[in-house]
Amino acid sequence: MPDISGILPNYNANYKALSMLANDLEKAVLISHSQSGFFPMEAALVDPKGIAAIVALEPGYCPTNLSKEQLKRLSNIPMLIIFGDYLDTTTGIDHSWQRACEQCETFSKSINEVGGNAQVVRLADEGIKGNSHMLMQDNNHLQLADKVMKWMDSLEQ
């Protein structure tokens, strides 16, 4: 079901519920996609203690206007943000995947400037090509899964 947070008054109960779930799971890796792409970060702003890492697959946006306090709160959580091909394709009214990717690169840089570990990967730049917006359903989804798993393994070292 699409998220209706755009019509809610400044609060989305999903963020609190997601942070509570992560706490119950004790160190969960939250993986998101598209419209809900920034939900794990929002959940971390509510309560980061149960979130071990975040993987965002083509998030619809990343905020570029977080306060230094918010950035610091997120800086203790490793983040991997992945974009596939076709960034120049527009979807919906005035939505650009290229702009979303650039926002996430700015977001990632801001997190890293306060001591965080955030990374944006453009799969095509790494030789992994042919990805639509539905990365997990593409023919090379196992390459994507391997990339995510290798990144997660690197966190344990």
Image: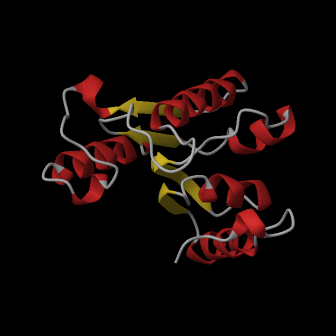
Which of 22 and 37 lies nearest the eye of the viewer?
37
Which of 152 and 118 lies nearest the eye of the viewer?
118
Position of 30 with respect to 17 (left or right) is: left
Q: Quadrant of residue 65?
A: top right
Q: Position of residue 138 (x, y in %)?
A: 19, 54
Look at 84% across and 32% down and name the residue there.
68
Q: Position of residue 31 (x, y in %)?
A: 46, 59
Look at 54% across and 48% down and name the residue there.
60
Which of 46 and 34 lies nearest the eye of the viewer?
34
Position of 5 with respect to 30 (left or right) is: right
Q: Position of residue 57 (x, y in %)?
A: 42, 49
Look at 24% across and 43% down and name the residue there.
131
Q: Quadrant of residue 87?
A: top left
Q: Quadrant of the C terminus?
A: top left
Instruction: Identify the residue at the far front of this view.
Output: 93
Look at 53% across and 51% down and name the residue there.
53
Position of 59 with respect to 9 (left or right) is: left
Q: Position of residue 83 (x, y in %)?
A: 39, 39
